[in-house]
Image (cartoon, rainbow, N blue to C red):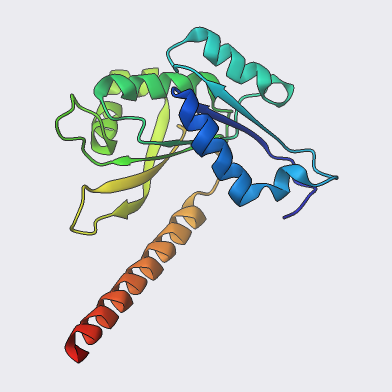
Amino acid sequence: KNSKCALNLCLNDLNKDVLTHISIANVWMNANHLFTSSSSTSSVQAVCGDWRDEKLIRNLLAINTNKERYHIIFGSETIYSQRMIETVLNLLLRLLSKPDGICVLSAKSYYFGCIGGGIQSLKMFMNVEENSKRYPFNVHTVYRVDDGMSNLREIVLITWKDECTLDLSHICKHMARYQSDEDEEVETEDEEAAEEEEQE
């Protein structure tokens, strides 16, 4: 809640209703203090549009502070097909700041029934030399969800290859610790549920 920290947040979705009724509402519910403080210099904007639209890319750059690229880009369920993998990577080429910009991407490991897509398809795509030269990024998995009941999901960090100077190890350690704590909570809940069944 440090009011001296300026946060310039830009929300984007293809669906205007998602931005209006979900994304913006979520920000105000969870972080309104960052934008409503009298001393705050933070801002939040919402832009609707298709990432393949050149006009949208120009708008996203124009509304950022001093027309800079973005230091952090978050994405969820954006690489559900092979075509979208390249769309996202092209977006990062244009919008992710150098050298230490980070993209945090959450997606399923595999998208069944779709043509390609998913974290594993992304990694295989980046392992092709031609693609790795065209899109000079590293992809690091920092969190994996495997609850045995649903599709595997992963969170990855995408950074500039050979340029990023950040030490990502502490992020990986934090995510590993979070996953360990979450697993313990699930185990505790399962044990409590089992005890309740025995008592009944």
What's the residue at 49%, 54% (across, down)? 171
**Residue 92 horizontal/vertical position (percent):** 47, 24
The spot of residue 81 in percent (x, y) is 26, 25
Lateral position of residue 189 relative to residue 53, left or right = left
Nearest the eye: 176 or 138: 176
Considering every residue shown, the one lying at the far front of the view is 200
Above or below for 147 versus 30: below
In this view of the protein, which residue sits in the foreground, 146 or 188?
188
Quadrant of the image for the C terminus? Answer: bottom left
Classify the position of the N terminus by image quarter: bottom right
Q: Residue at x 30, y 28 (%)?
A: 126
Q: State whether residue 144 is above or below residue 139.
A: below
Q: Is residue 164 above or below residue 190?
A: above
Closest to the observer: 162 or 121?
A: 121
Q: Pick out the residue farthest to the left.
A: 113
Please provide percent x and percent y for residue 32: 68, 47
Residue drawn at x 50%, y 38% is 22
